[in-house]
Image (cartoon, rainbow, N blue to C red):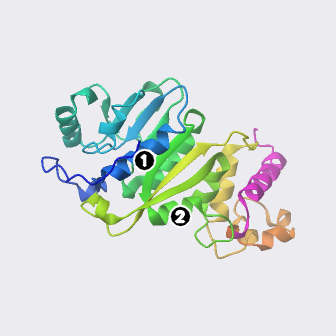
Amino acid sequence: MLFCGRNKFNLNSPLAKKSLGQHFLHDENISGRIVDSLMEKLSEPNNVIEIGPGPGALTKILLKKKINLRCIELDQRMIEHLNKTYPSSKDKVIHGDFLKVNLSEIFNDKYSVVGNFPYNISSQILFRILQEKETIPIMVGMFQKEVGDRIASIHGNKIYGILSVLVQAFYDVENLFIVEPASFTPPPKVKSVVLRLIRKKEKEKIYDEKYFFAFVKNAFGQRRKTLRNSLSQLIVKEKLTDAIFGKRAEQLSVQQFIDLANKFAKENGNQG
C-alpha cells in the first residue's frame, strides 16, 4: 500500500536538533514506500527495530502492521511526543543509543531494522548492523545519497571503499529510490537515498572475520597506493609479490578481498 500526498509537518513536534543530525521526514508517500520496502521482504519472525523514530513518520505506519515493533530513540523529547501523539507506541519505545544498546535484550531472536538514519552516525549504524549481522536478515534505511552510493558501489569506482566491501560481503544491497530535500523538515542540503540490505543466503566462507575486517581497512588505508604498500603493516612484503598486489584496493572485487584475506588468515594460523 502506497501513501499519497504530503502532509504538513506537525507543528507541535519538537524542533530538530542539528547536534543529533535530525531531519524529520514529512512526506507520507516516502514513509509509505519505506515501510512497504520492508514489509514485502519480511518473514518470520516478524520482529522489527526502528532506529530514531523522531516524531513518528514511519512509526505511525509501522504501528498498524502485524509486527513486533520496538523503537530506539535517543531524544527524550521525541519519546514524550510519540507517547502523546501515538498512544499505542507506549512500551514500544526504548530510550537509548542504537550504537550502545544491548540488542539481545530487546529481541532474543532475529529482527529486521528500519529507519531514517541520522546522517552524522549512519556509517556507525551500518558497522553496528554488521556486528549483529547473524540476527539482522533485513535492513531498510535512508542515508545521505553520497553515503548510500558508496555502500552500493562496485569495484573499479573511486567511491568504492571499506563500507562497500564489508557490507557487500554479507548483504545484497539494493538502491531503492532517491528522496529530495523538500521531503524533510528542516530540509537537508543534500539528497537522500533509501537502501535495502538482504542477508546473503549463500554465505561466502570467511575464515576469520576479524582478520577480514582488518585486511579490508588496511587495504583502503592508503587508497592511492598499491596493495603492496597499503598491506605492508599487516603482511610482510615478501608475501606480496603476486601481480594482484600491484593494484589499488578499489580495483579488487568483494570476492577477491574474501579470497585474499582467507589465504593470509590461514597462513598466519588465525582461528577460523
Q: Which residue is drawn at 71% across and 64% down?
A: 231
Q: Quadrant of residue 238?
A: bottom right
Q: Quadrant of residue 105?
A: top left
Judge whether 86 appears above or below 3 on screen. above
Residue 265: image location, x then y, percent: 78, 48
Residue 94: image location, x then y, percent: 32, 32
Q: In which quarter of the image is residue 8?
A: bottom left
Q: Amino acid under label 1?
A: Ile
Q: Residues within 10 Å of mark 2 (few under 14, many from 20)?
A: some
Q: Amino acid under label 2?
A: Asp
Q: Which residue is drawn at 79% across and 56% down?
A: 260
Residue tagged 2: 149
Task: Indicate the quadrant containing the C terminus: top left, top right, bottom left or bottom right.
Answer: top right
Which numbered disc, 1 or 2, marks the residue closer to the eye? Answer: 1
In the foreground, 62 or 212: 62
Q: How far apart are marks 1 and 2 (CA)?
A: 18 Å
| Disc ID at residue 34 | 1
Residue 184: image location, x then y, percent: 29, 58
Asked whether, in this view, residue 245 is left or right of residue 56, the answer is right
